[in-house]
Amino acid sequence: MDTGRRPGAAQLAFDELGTPLRDITFVVFDLETTGTKPGPDGITEIGAVKIRAGEVVGEFATFVNPGMPIPPQIVELTGITGAMVYDAPRIERVLPAFLEFISGAVLVAHNAAFDTGFMRAACEGHGYHWPKTAVVCTVRLARRVISRDETPSYRLSALAALFGARTTPNHRALADARATVDVLHALLERVGNLGVHTLEELLDYLPEVTAAQRRKRSLAEHLPSRPGVYLFRGPSDEVLYVGTSSDLRRRVRQYFTGSESRGRIREMVALAERVDAVECAHALEAAVRELRLIAAHRPMYNRRSKNPRHAWWVALTEEAFPRLSVVRMPRDGMLGPFRTQTDARSAADTLAGASGLRTCTQRISATAPSGTPCVLAELGRCGAPCAGLQTVEAYRPGVLAVSGLIAGTDGRPLRAAADQLARLSAAEHYEQAAQHRDQLAGLIRAVGRAHRQSALAGIPELIAAGPDGNGGWELAVIRHGRLASAGVARRGVPPMPVVEMLVASAETVLPGPGPLFGAIPEEIGILLRWLTRPGVRLVRTTRPWAEPAAVAGGWQEWLDLAASATALERVAG
């Protein structure tokens, strides 16, 4: 593709990002139709030109029987009459050949929403799949780079005249497509002078990005095309925003040429004075470092993960008749973490109902209870220890069952909750049953997540390797739920010497308090997602990595059925 570089202009360097435009196959196409509303029929003519590296490599042109009369005003505009398309193939016969012609190409059209809208509707109406390919609209591109001083209109005829197109558009599909090819070449020359040389940059080039923002692309020039974390810094060197990417330079450049629709991010880019980067061995290390940097700097333009340690936990209180309490500080024997207090409270209430624990907050004496039974006692959902109707010994099995569930040794509370759900359904209390089902599903997921996270956090050292996609290995040393070291063994490099070097240089991690041994829940979540990817292998571990299989682990089929039922109810509702 001719990107408009003149002789002597600098060529793309090897570290340029994205796919150079000269390597892209474009199909420039145009339709003539019976009207303006897309539908399964109504197309009267298709014209398309396939180009690559500035050269035409193919053309496609055909009349199409629209399956309906052509309005007189359309006949006057295009010159296409009903007699001309009478013997033409219907669109369902044309689509296979056209779809094959455009396969693997980037589509280009003048007012592309109109043309692609008709083609998509035709495909949907006749059982064909419209490809999810990139689309370039020459009207939109022209509005970005050509001022009203140069042209009074962005119509194809006006742009073709402005750029001296070799073909004059005449509302016939192939002629208009040929004219659009020349317009496209001229527009690419304009944006090429602005530093847009790749397909990705072209697709990201939007009018909302101001000239001042585009000039800031120089802030990305020093960044490597490597995985890592980037930090936008403001006038006082404060960190404005932290992000991660598998290609630092490419991602940061997108902020200055990209289709960034978030107003707050555009505001951040306008304030930025510098972009720093932390190179990482691979995407896992980048994700972990991003999380830690956001927590450390609390950037004003990041919305998530500013308080990764501020989770909620469900704990048994320490008294004669323990109850379940929602707290912020973790300690051993707690259930969690939960993202919100509401989620934690729902799990606590469901667990209390399944195990028979009280939900009142009063302190009850083991020897001289003086309370009055509440409505829950009258309904048989509480043994009323406050009124002396339940002893410490009689109350203890529920406490032990909850403790066992949290520890992963006792699944009775989940089975009891499922029995309650069955009774509600049998009694045709369907709304209550649906609510109880969703609460139980939340509890099961919380217990399973807690067991997975605590199992990993309890291991003093675990070393794993994942394929890097190029015949090498991404390596991670994990200690008590924290990434202690990361590296790569490229293809052809023996991995074990690299592993030993990473272990020797890894961060020392001392276990802390609580079920996660002081680790950050979000970081453990990142590590678990990486460890459970296809192809990841354990190199070695100081203790077996195992989690309870018979507690939450045995409920996956039930969870799948519950999720399906919930989805159906949402559709029906």
Image (tube, rainbow, N blue to C red):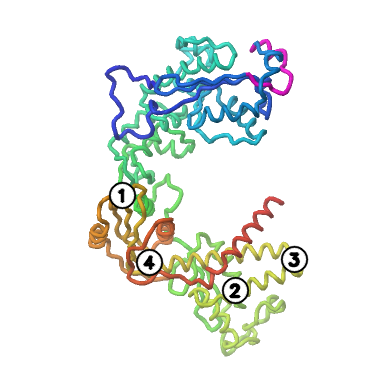
Q: Is residue 307 visible?
A: no
Type of amino acid under label 4: Gly
| Residue marked by disc 3 | 429
Residue 389: percent from the left, percent from the top?
Answer: 65, 86
Whichever of labels 1 and 2 marks the residue nearer the N terminus, that label is: 1
For marks 4 and 1 on the same chain, the one whose residue lies earlier in the sequence: 1
Q: Is 355 placed above or below 464 here?
A: below
Tell me the tag on residue 352: 2
Q: Indicate the position of residue 91 as horizontal and vertical percent values.
A: 65, 26
Choose the circle earlier in sequence order: 3 or 1.
Answer: 1
Residue indicated by mark 4: 518
Q: Which residue is mark 1?
A: 280
Q: Residue at x 38, y 66 (%)?
A: 518
User: What amino acid type should be assigned to the residue bearing mark 3?
Assistant: His
Q: Amino acid at mark 2?
A: Ala
Residue 274 painted magenta: no
Q: Are marks 4 and 1 in contact (CB under 8 Å)?
A: no
Q: Residues within 10 Å of mark 3 (few under 14, many from 20)?
A: few
